[in-house]
Image (cartoon, helix red, strand yellow):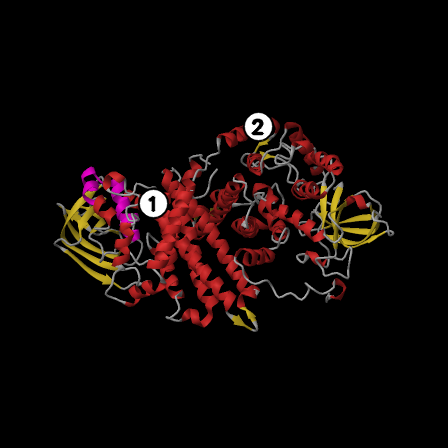
Amino acid sequence: MDFNDSPQEAAFRAEARAWLEDNAERKGPGKVYRYKRGEPELIPAARAWEERKFEGGFSGIALPREYGGRGETRLQQIIFAEEEADYLIPPAVFSISHGMAVPTLLTYATEEQKQRYVPATLRGDEIWCQMFSEPAGGSDLAGLRTRSVRDGDADDADWIINGHKIWTSGAHYADMAILVTRSDPDAPKHKGLTYFFLDMKSPGIEVRPIRQISGYSNFNEVFMTDLRIPDAQRLGDVGQGWQVAITTLMNERVSSGVRPAPDFEDIFDLVRMTELENGPAIADGAIREKLADWYIKAQGVKLIRARLMTALSRGERPGPENSVSKLVSAFRRQEIAHFGMDLLDMGGGMVDPDLAPMRAMYQQALLDAPGGRIAAGSDEILRNIISERVLGLPPDIRVDKELPFDQLPSGR
Amino acid sequence: MNFDFSEEQYLLRDQAKKFLNDRAPPAAVRAVLEDDATSHDHGLWQDMARLGWVGTTIPEEYGGAGLNGEDLCVIAEELGRTLAPTPFSSSVYLATGALLMAGSERQKQDYLPDLAAGARIGCMAVAEGIGVAHATSIQTSVNDGVMTGKKLPVADGDAADFAIVLAKQGAVGDLSLFLVDLDGDGVHRTPVAMIDPTRSHAEITFEGAAAEPLGAPGDGWSLTQAIFDRAAIPMAFEQVGGAQACLDMATEYAKNRFAFGRAIGSFQAIKHKLADIYVATELARANAYYGAWALANDAPDLPTAAAAARVAAGEAYNLAARENIQTHGGMGFTWEFDCHMYYRRAKLLSLALGGERRWKDRLVSLLETRNSSGEE
């Protein structure tokens, strides 16, 4: 075993660090990034940061040079992300663009489309959103109902889209979207889907932000009424939408690796600055046990990531590690948020960032954390994935796999 | 970055797996479980010595294989997976570890070749009954080279030829370590019944036994902690191996046991339980691997890595062993099924070297020191 970078990796890390030092402010005690997700000022700042990275050669690190990338490996991409995490930078507004839209375009779009869209995305000019989930299909993605119908009989006829998407992150500021629709309701549910990309300024799109329990709006409902999409913007064959969506989602499981806050280091800091009725909080046995448990989880996730990097450096495909990490981290964040507030006792309920420690990190996380356990594979779906794909246990008994979609029971 | 075992280490693992599947099947473990007079599987121990496992980390000049801590961990995981009933942890992790760390050249020459060959078995005697053994609780003492006191439980104390004993130097003296020949005069040993009868333990009474200092006088407590730190890492691999065995058993059973017209493994109540065991085991494995790296490289971070590995592996094994019984239903509660052998071992291992609460406390203390010294 060897935790050191190879000479090549070390050189890349040094280059990344030097560039970040020149272009961003390093994190420090009590320093947090100035805009939160959901604040309007965030988007221009995020675009500017993306453009700066693009100019510096650090956007799309693992993507081919001909599309504006750097042509390096996923490992280099992770190294950059590790270093970037030490700096005060905008929260990940581009993760769907880079992690989901671009890999799907690179797999299924025409050469001309790749040239048109990929560099523009890497430069920060275009932000993508992902229109998959629907009121009737969240975890059961293939249950979606948004209809796509050909406008005429020609092989390259436009498509007319009608339907309703939900939980669409960033749809209120996105320039472009990827979209899965149902083109054949007579086929079994996984076989009647077709996949597109589109301009969010197209006529027939209405975006309505959803107000979350935090009060912020990161998600939206998107209503499509007679939305017209040229056939040239179809990705994959008609009826092949499920396979294309899987390409997108495989990338989601790898791309969402951002450290949740508060994590172990944050709660450790808070405990050490807290005085209880009978002495320092850090001297309390019950609290120490909790800290130990959170440390081994945080450290375990970090080390599982090291194993992922090892696999990537050997050119292997990532395994189920990301399901484990996300399952563990999302839940831990909620636990830590609860405990952090409890530690503040009667004052713990105050949400004013000028009064609550660490700019109200714990209070904010309490309200954000439930979403982390639902988005990008809920806790329950991740446990299904682990038990079925890793342990080989039988799939759930399904009543929906072979029936034509329009004959499935739908409830209310 | 290469956070994985090497090809040679994978070969070693395959060899260990094959050998132990053959030589330490559940029936062999059960034979020790059901025979009160047997401390361990003597034939298995001799064969493990012949394979060079017992001397894994002993340098070649003392008759060992001269391998590193990672290799030891590879073997430990397989020992844990099969519950192999031998004094391996006492003789290899603790006694050998203590001599390598603190032994004089003469002591090394005297003990290590025999330890490597499996001809002598060592153990370590710290606890003195119920409760936490700590720097000021130890009563066993040595005056003019003669030991008086009582240690219990001592893992493998009845099987071992010698013990490394933590004792006071003089009536009020500092703690030091001593080597004591357990077949010598003034030593009385009686077996102690333990929660896991496949691992033998003894009560050892010293009444004027000859005791030879090991390491500098007064270093007894810090040496014990350092020896425990290093032992905790292969011990964590035994725990990870055991947790994995429980997960495998439960998964296999859930696939083949049918109720309500379907495999019980198709119910999410079972699937999610087993997914949780998988997650805990993977977290433990990751922490244990880091410990193996720290052990092989003598990393400054070793005590923290050891404590994290120990806590994570103990929790994973206890969870896996408990929920394995639950998954098996009533049959899991019977003597006849093997589930209880893992349940017992899981608990025993999490008490050996000190309980979970103590290691959690130590982990946090180490993290406090690390943070205040400004390291990452």
- Viewer-side residue, A213 vs A195: A195
Chain assignment, label 2:
A
Residue A42 placement, left or right of B201: right
- Circle 2 residue: A21
- Circle 1 residue: B230
**Image quarter in which the N terminus of chain A is found:** top left
Q: Which residues are magenta?
A: B88-111
Asked if residue A8 can be seen in this view, the reply is yes
Q: Could you tell me which residue is drawn at 30 percent across and 41 percent down?
A: B66
Asked whether B101 falls inside the magenta stretch, the response is yes
- Viewer-side residue, B188 vs A255: A255
The secondary structure type at the circle numbered 2 is: helix
Determine whether A286 is above or below A393 in the image.
above
Furthest residue toward bottom:
B260
Determine whether B274 is above or below A85 in the image.
below
**Amino acid at the residue labelled 2:** Glu
Q: Position of residue B249 (x, y in %)?
A: 45, 62
Residue B217 placement, left or right of A356: left
Asked whether A379 falls inside the magenta stretch, the response is no
Q: Are marks 2 and 1 on the same chain?
A: no
Q: Looking at the image, how many numbered discs can be counted on the residues?
A: 2
Q: Could you tell me which residue is drawn at 74 percent across and 44 percent down?
A: A177
Q: Quadrant of residue B106?
A: top left
Q: Which mark is residue A254?
A: none
